[in-house]
Image: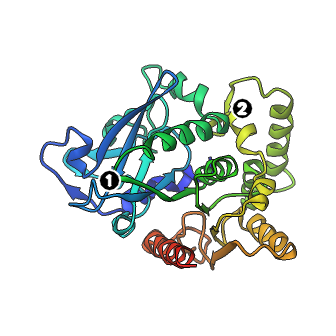
Amino acid sequence: MKDSKYIFLLWIFSTTLAYGQTTSAEDFGFRHLVFRYKTDPIDILIKSKKGEEYLRKPLFFFCQGSLPIPLILHRGNDAYGTFPFTPDSLTQTYHVVIISKPSIPLIADVTTLKPNFTFVDSTNNFPKGYINRNLLSYYAPRNIALLRWLQTLPWVSTKQLVVAGHSEGSTIAAKMASTFSNITHLIYSGGNPAGRILTMIEGNRSYETDTDSTRYGEDMLQHWSDISTKHHKKTIVYGDPDLATLEFSEPMLPFLEKLKIPVLVTYGTKDWSSPYNDMLRVNLLRKRKNNFTFKAYIGVEHNFFPLTKDNKPNYDIFNWDNVVSDWRIWLTSTTLR
């Protein structure tokens, strides 16, 4: 998917830490819990402020983007960031939570993965367990069931529950917020409220190679026509099964517009989905809804990298931590209202 084109560079640009023998999540500074959803074991990583692991705090639950990527990546004794941002500032107030993709190992040496850090099985394909579960209709209820359980633990405060998602994760987070009343704050980052397929079409329209002869945008529309009528198939095209593309193309606009909790929408103005976030903003202004805050980052792309003169991401300028700082400021202001 679109976010997969750049998300791996976020790990490369994260701070690299040296460890001795790295064999468990604890070696990387996380607590590791396992939750069973139906028959599936779900790995949970929790990042807390050192010394405050069992201090009662609310949860900050992060829904990551697409593709079957292990949560903890390392090369020998060098560890890559699990989040696309540094979570330490968030741990001042929250226990920060992220969970695994189905049928994907928790920890992996990047030398055993594909160049884009994805995990494949012995047949050199994404595991069937992942393909069959990589669906909005799986992720949203799974995450809600897990959060219900976490909120029963003695070190978790139930006074606040923040759910944030970026890219594919934004769709999951929005769907969760529309059905789970325990969520008190939603951060919708880098999503397309009109649905994934429109981002895919816009991306193909934006390519310099999309001409009258290549017509990549038209090809994507034909792909959408095909999966709209044959979505029962698990054919993998453009990185995802057809059913996953269909489900993640469900517009979140009607769900978002009905929310009454505080919502922060963050996006880069050079992201292909930017016009649709502007559309959401216009619609909400028209309806005079005041529970939404929008933060548009001017001149940056999907993962908040600025663009060079030739419209390529400038990976020397890392803005994710600035974005998270804005998340914290917003959370503080909405909590104090």
Whole-number angstrom distance, CA of label 1 to CA of label 2: 31 Å
In this view, the residue in front, 299 or 195, is: 195
In this view, the residue in front, 162 or 305, is: 162
Q: Amino acid at mark 1?
A: Tyr
Q: Name the residue carrying label 2.
A: 243
Q: Whole-percent x and y of residue 263?
A: 65, 66
Q: Whole-percent x and y of residue 201?
A: 78, 52
From the viewer's perspective, tell me whether residue 110 is left or right of residue 99.
left
Residue 106 in view (yes/no): no
Q: Amino acid at mark 2?
A: Leu
In this view, the residue in front, 315 or 176, is: 176
Q: Whole-percent x and y of residue 72?
A: 34, 45
From the viewer's perspective, tell me whether residue 291 is left or right of residue 131.
right
Q: Name the residue carrying label 1.
A: 80
Residue 64 in view (yes/no): yes
Q: Secondary structure at mark 1?
A: loop
First in sequence: mark 1 or mark 2? 1
| Image quadrant containing the C terminus | bottom right
Q: Tell me the residue at 71%/62% (across/down).
A: 273
* Label number found at residue 161: none
Q: Tell me the residue at 42%/63% (across/down).
A: 85
Q: Tell me the residue at 35%/62% (across/down).
A: 14
From the viewer's perspective, tell me whether residue 76 is left or right of residue 144.
left
